[in-house]
Image (cartoon, grey):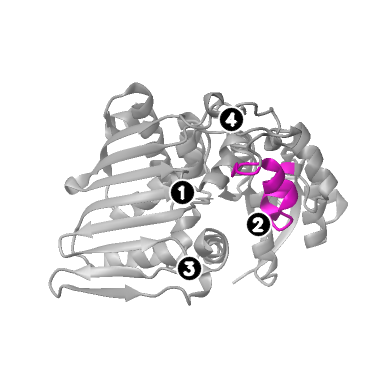
Amino acid sequence: MKKLKAIVIGCGNRGINYSTIMSWDRDRFEVVAIAEPIDDRRNYLKNMWDIPENRCFSSFEALLALGKIADFAIIATMDRMHYAPAMKAIELGYDLLLEKPISPTKEECVSIAKAAEERNVRVVICTVLRYSAIFKMLKKLIDEGQIGKITSVNHEECVGNVHFSHSFTRGNWKNSEESSNMLLQKSCHDLDILYWLIGKKCRKIQSFGSLEYFTEKNAPEGAPDYCIEGCPKSDTCPYNAVKLYLDDKENAWFRTTATKLTSPTDEDVEKAIRTTEYGKCVFKCSNNVVDRQTVNMLFEDGITATFTMNPFNSGGRNIHIMGTEGEIRSALDARTPITVYRFETGKTEEFDITACDSIVGGHGGGDGGLINELYDYLNDNYSGCSVPTINESLYGHLLVFAAEESRLSGRIVDVESFINE
C-alpha cells in the first residue's frame, strides 16, 4: 500500500497529536503542508516534518489555494472553524480526517455530509473511542451474542473535576456561543458509541441538564478574580490555577494550552494565569455550558439507554450493558478487565485488555488506533468495523442535537421527525 500524504489545518493539541502519531510511522505517512496562525505551533510541526517554508501558512485559505497536493486533510481547528476549510477541502477532492464535532450546528453538519457524498470523498470524524481496545472488545462481545440481545445500556462519562475546570470552565469550550454545547463537544463520542454498540436507530430522546456549580454564587467569600492575586481558599481549592498551571511542571497539557506555546517557560505560564481565563477563579469565568447532563434514549426493539455526563468525579468512563442472556461491565482504563456474567452458568468471565498495546495513549489507545485504521481505510484495504461513514457520524451528531432540543424545550423528542425537519 502507498504512503499517504497529508496536510494539517490547525496545529493545536489535536493537530499536533495526530501528526506526532503519524511521525512514528513515516513509511506510511507524510505531512507535506500545514496551516496555523500561531507561529510557535506552526513551527513545531514544520520542524517535526521538515516542511519547506513555502508549504507553511498562517491561514487555511492560503494552503487550500494550492489545490489538492496530498491524499487527505486533517482539520483540527476550533469547532466553529471546521465548516469553511472542510467544505473547501471537499470541493478540491480531499478525503478528510475531521476533528469532532463535525460542526456546532445541525445545518452545517448536514451540509458537510451532503458535500462529501456529492464529491465522493471520505470524511472520517475523530470519534476515537471506536478505536480503543476496550470499545472494540465490547463491540465484538455484543456482536458474538455473548449476552444475547441487548435490552438496556447505562453509560457514564466522568469528565473529572479538574479536567472540566480546565477545558469547560476556563478553557476553549467554556462558552457554547464561542465553540459548541457541552454534549456535542465532549460527548458526541459517547452517543456515537451507544449507536454503534447497539446497532439500532434511536426512536425517542429526552435530556436534562444545567449549569449549577461553576457559577459566581459559589465563589469563596473574598475570592479575587484571579487565583494568583491571593485567595483565602488557595490552600484547599482543587481549582487553584497557581497550583494547576504554574507549580505543576509535569502537566504539559495544561501549560501548553494556557500559553498556546509548545514549550512554555514559567514566565509564560505566569503571564497566562495573570491575563487569561486560565488563571481566573473557576466561579467567575464566562462559562455557560452545563456542568451536568443526562440523556434517556429509546432505540428500536424497545432497547433503552441512559447516558450521563458529569464532572464531579476523578474522571473516566463506565458502561453497563444488559442483555437477555447476561451482562457486561467495563471501565475505560488500563487496570479494570471487562467482565461478562452469563445467566446460564451463573459465572463471570474476565477479559483482560491491560496487556493490549493499543491501550497506551490518548483515549485508551483510541488516538493511535484511529490513525492506524485510517491508513488501511484510505488505501481501500479496510476490513474492520470501527471507521464510520460520514452519514453514520452525522446520525450520532443528530442524536446530540435532538438531546439538546429536549433539554432546552423540556419535551421528549421524536428522533425521526427531528431529523426530517
In this rendering, position of residue 161 left or right of residue 254: left
Q: Is residue 86 visible?
A: yes
Circle 3 residue = 334
Quadrant position of the N terminus in the picture: bottom right
SS state under label 1: loop
Q: Which residue is mark 4?
A: 220
Amino acid type, mark 4: Pro
Q: CA distance from mark 1 to mark 4?
A: 21 Å
Asked if residue 230 is among those painted magenta in the image, a careful observer would answer no
Q: Helix or strand or loop: what does disc 2 sit on?
A: helix
CB-based contact (under 8 Å), mark 2 and mark 3: no
Circle number at residue 313: 1
Position of residue 385 in the picture relative to residue 83 (left or right) = left
> Does residue 126 lie above or below 371 as drawn?
above
Q: CA distance from mark 2 to mark 3?
A: 20 Å
The percent coordinates of residue 409 (x first, y second) are 34, 22
> Which mark is nearer the camera, 2 or 1?
1
